[in-house]
Structures are given as structure tokens and as C-alpha cells.
Image: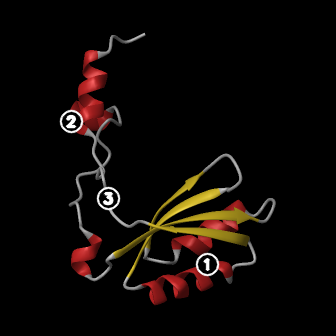
């Protein structure tokens, strides 16, 4: 374990929490378009919202993709309003997850990597 941690293979030992079991049953993804040159400001604004679980820089029509949880659709709308209050964020596009077909997993990737010869 120590070797894997040192190499950066294992990056976290935290518990896996099911947000729906602590009152956040809505899972959504926000695609954000940010104002030119204001990435750092946008990320700073997003970091202040505890309901935003992840933010990824993306290519394509959006600049950032956020995984967000909410207590209700009304609460989600309030979160979106706070996000849009930042002058660094120009537009959002929201997708609500209706179900999870494959939950976050890593073991199949580890198994595949172990079976693949290193280049």
C-alpha cells in the first residue's frame, strides 16, 4: 500500500458516501461556459458550494463539467442561480441523472492495467 501511495496510484483512503442517504437525492451535471480568462475565478466560486462534488476542465462547447447534488429540484435551481451569480460564469446547461447504471468503479481498470504489458 505504501508503494502504491508513494507512486500516486492510491490517492485517497476516505469513506465512500452516498449523498442520497444524507439528504441529497438529486444528482446533476452542470456544463459551464466561463468568461474568457476567468477560469481561476470560476473555480474559486464553485469551490465555495459544498453541493458541487467535482469539477473537471473539458474540451468542446463547455469549459467545465460539475457533478452536483441537491436536496430537490428547487434546491438545484437555487444552486444554479448561485453559480450564475459569478461574473466568471456565462452560461450553464444542466442534466439531471435519472438513474445510475454503472456506479463509480476502479477495480476493472486496475485489473485491465495489471493485464496490459507496460510500453
Q: Nearer the viewer, mark 3 or mark 2?
A: 3
Residue at 52% across, 71% down: 47
Residue 27 lies in quadrant? bottom left
Residue at 68% across, 84% down: 85
Residue 93 lies in quadrant? bottom right
Residue 96 picture location, percent across and down: 46, 69
Most foreground residue, 43 or 31: 31
Instruction: Identify the mark nearer the N-term, 1 or 3.
Output: 1
Residue 79 picture location, percent across and down: 53, 82
Horizontally, residue 95 falls left or right of residue 1, namely right
In this rendering, is residue 113 above or below 67? above
| Structural crowding at the residue carrying mark 2, measured as other residues with C-alpha within 10 Å and reported as few (<14), some (14–19) or many (≥20) | few
SS of the residue under disc 2: helix
Residue at 25% across, 33% down: 108
SS of the residue under disc 3: loop
Residue hosting label 2: 2
Instruction: Identify the mark nearer the N-term, 1 or 2.
Output: 2
| Structural crowding at the residue carrying mark 3, measured as other residues with C-alpha within 10 Å and reported as few (<14), some (14–19) or many (≥20) | few
Q: Distance between the residues labelled 1 and 2?
A: 39 Å
Residue hosting label 1: 83
Horizontally, residue 3 falls left or right of residue 57, namely left
Residue 53 picture location, percent across and down: 42, 66
Q: Which of marks 1 and 2 is in front?
A: 1
Residue 112 lies in quadrant? top left
Amino acid at each position: 500500500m505504501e508503494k502504491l501511495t508513494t507512486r500516486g496510484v492510491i490517492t485517497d483512503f476516505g469513506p465512500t458516501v452516498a449523498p442520497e442517504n444524507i439528504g441529497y437525492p438529486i444528482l446533476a451535471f452542470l456544463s459551464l461556459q466561463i468568461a474568457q480568462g476567468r477560469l481561476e475565478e470560476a473555480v474559486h466560486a464553485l469551490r465555495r458550494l459544498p453541493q458541487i462534488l467535482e469539477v473537471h476542465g473539458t474540451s468542446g462547447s463547455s469549459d467545465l463539467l460539475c457533478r452536483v447534488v441537491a436536496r430537490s429540484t428547487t434546491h438545484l435551481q437555487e444552486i444554479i442561480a448561485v453559480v450564475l451569480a459569478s461574473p466568471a460564469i456565462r452560461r450553464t446547461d444542466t442534466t439531471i441523472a435519472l438513474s445510475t447504471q454503472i456506479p463509480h468503479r476502479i477495480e476493472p481498470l486496475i485489473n485491465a492495467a495489471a493485464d496490459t504489458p507496460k510500453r
